[in-house]
Amino acid sequence: MLSACGLDCSKCDIFIASSNIEVAKKIAEWFNEFRHANIDYKDIHCGGCKCNVNDHWSPDCWILNCCVSKKHIDDCSECDTFPCIKLKEWSYMNDGYLKAYNTLEKLRNERLNNK
């Protein structure tokens, strides 16, 4: 499953934790130790960007809100303004985001070539 930003949900630890208690416990332990949070493992879950926004790990995610809530599209590659400056800047934040952005570019090109 692909997220709105192009990340592969099946490789996301938080998505995996939704169905794996041991993974959820490890993530909660990490947050509690390194982020000085007080998170219960039962709160570590995400149903992906196509789920109810309340079941999303980051319901306030700007990409989720732009694509799904405002524009009613599945991912950024479907947007008329793709790629927007904000998404480009986001993609430079780390290698995972850049890979997600490249996935969106590939999807966009495939979509345009099939028209």
Image: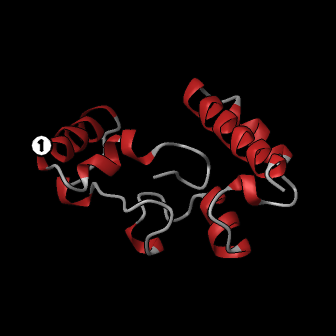
Residue occupying the point 48% across, 43% down: 8
Above or below for 72 versus 61? below
In this picture the colour scheme is secondary structure
Q: Is residue 25 rendered to the left or right of residue 7?
A: left
Q: Nearer the viewer, residue 4 or 31?
A: 4
Residue occupying the point 55% across, 63% down: 60
- Specify the quadrant of the image occupied by residue 19: bottom left
- Specify the quadrant of the image occupied by residue 30: top left
Q: Amino acid at mark 1?
A: Glu
Q: Residue furthest front?
A: 114
Above or below for 89 versus 49? above
Q: Is residue 50 rendered to the left or right of residue 105?
A: left
Q: Residue furthest top?
A: 95
- Location of residue 27 in the rendering, given as x and y in whole percent from the top left corner: 25, 40
Q: Nearer the viewer, residue 72 or 44?
A: 72
**Label 1: which residue?**
22
- Location of residue 53 in the rendering, given as x and y in whole percent from the top left corner: 47, 72
Q: Residues within 10 Å of mark 1 (few under 14, many from 20)?
A: few
Q: Residue furthest left?
A: 22
- Location of residue 103 in the rendering, given as x and y in whole percent from the top left corner: 64, 38
Q: Nearer the viewer, residue 82 or 59?
A: 82
Residue occupying the point 41% across, 58% down: 57
